[in-house]
Image (spheres, helix red, strand yellow):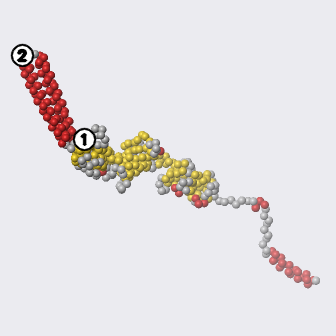
Amino acid sequence: MTHILRCLALIAPVLLAACSSEPPLPEPATISDELTPVIAAPIKVQTVIVESVDLADPLIASGTIAAKQTSNIGVLAGGVVEKIYVKVGDRVKKGQALFQTRRVDYEQQLSEAEAQLSIALAEQANAENALKRTSALLDKGHVSQAVFDDVQATLQVAKSQAALRRTQVDAAKQKLDDTTVRSPFNGAVTARYIDEGVFMANSFSGMGNSAVVQIQECEIAAGILFAPESEVARLHLGLTGSLYVDGRDEPIRSEIIILNDRVDPKARTVEFRMAFLNEGCAVRAGQSVRAEVDVDPRPALVLPRAALQGTSSSPYVFVVDGDRARRTTVTVQDIDAVQVEVLSGLSAADRVITGPLDKISDGTQVEANAS
């Protein structure tokens, strides 16, 4: 027995040491620890402030080039067109002959008028001599005052007849001269309506169209342009700008010289014109033209294009609202490749998130860093 007790005394310390090397049991979890939520850290974002700036974007309009004036030139003295001196594309100077109608009829009329004038002048000279003789006889008492008055009246009639015949001669000369029609200004021939041998009545006869050729004064030209009616308030006389003509590398500087007060009720556009010197008629009437008008600056809300999300038809942005990101639908229009103009949805001083947008959704907690 004594031996057994001695053995137990030797084993006990070893058992105690082995038990003391095991890890302690964990304390039981409480109910309150199981219900504590996990708090996510806010996402750090970069932002920009929506700015209100004076935007000097050009007003864009399109239209057509027109010559300063275009005239359909017709006959002045009716008759058969004997000769046409020009063709389409010719440059002409003021006073240059364009075409000629038959002269023989008008030469005959002039000859007849000159003959009638000669008769009238002879009758006037005869009446003047008769008056001199009658005046001498009246002084001597050989004729009565009544006879003298008759002779004097005959002279007045002869003078009037001579004046009438002179007028008829001048008219006949003018008609003969009018058989050759000349250009009223420097320009270019842009149309030829008939060929030689056609009878043409002058425009005063009421017998229809008497145009033979068309002349354009092309050394001065203008762009006839049309802008949306929404741009009416931005347009006024004197605004400068650039005209871009198809087929021409360099723009043409010009200014608005005509602004139509009427808005087209169908097209909803307003017309304006920008003139320029067209040296050598290099720009042709009828060519299409685009204008960029330097209108006065206007206030606008500007935003970087990188802040936009969604599609081009339904864009939106994320705005910092307190410590949250709020999705906001916007309406924008292009300024350039980097910026857009905000038309609706935002106000000046709104803080818009620019990144990282792939981690942001409506309601996301954010921490804004101003950029």
Callout in the foreground (1, 2) = 1
Label 1 sits on a secondary structure element that is loop
The residue indicated by pointer 1 is: 78
Q: Is residue 358 above or below residue 122?
A: below
Q: In this rendered view, identify the residue nearer to me: 268 or 13.
A: 268
Q: In this rendered view, identify the residue nearer to me: 280 or 2.
A: 280
Label 2 sits on a secondary structure element that is loop
In the visual, does 290 lie left or right of 354?
left
Q: In this rendered view, identify the residue nearer to me: 87 or 22.
A: 87
x and y percent of residue 7 in the render? Answer: 88, 82
In the visual, does 128 lie left or right of 295?
left
x and y percent of residue 303 in the render? Answer: 52, 53
The residue indicated by pointer 2 is: 142
Q: Which mark is residue 346?
A: none
Spot the residue most to the right.
Answer: 1
Q: Quadrant of residue 134?
A: top left
x and y percent of residue 93 in the render? Answer: 24, 47
Among numbered discs 1 and 2, the one appearing first in the sequence: 1
x and y percent of residue 205 in the render? Answer: 28, 38
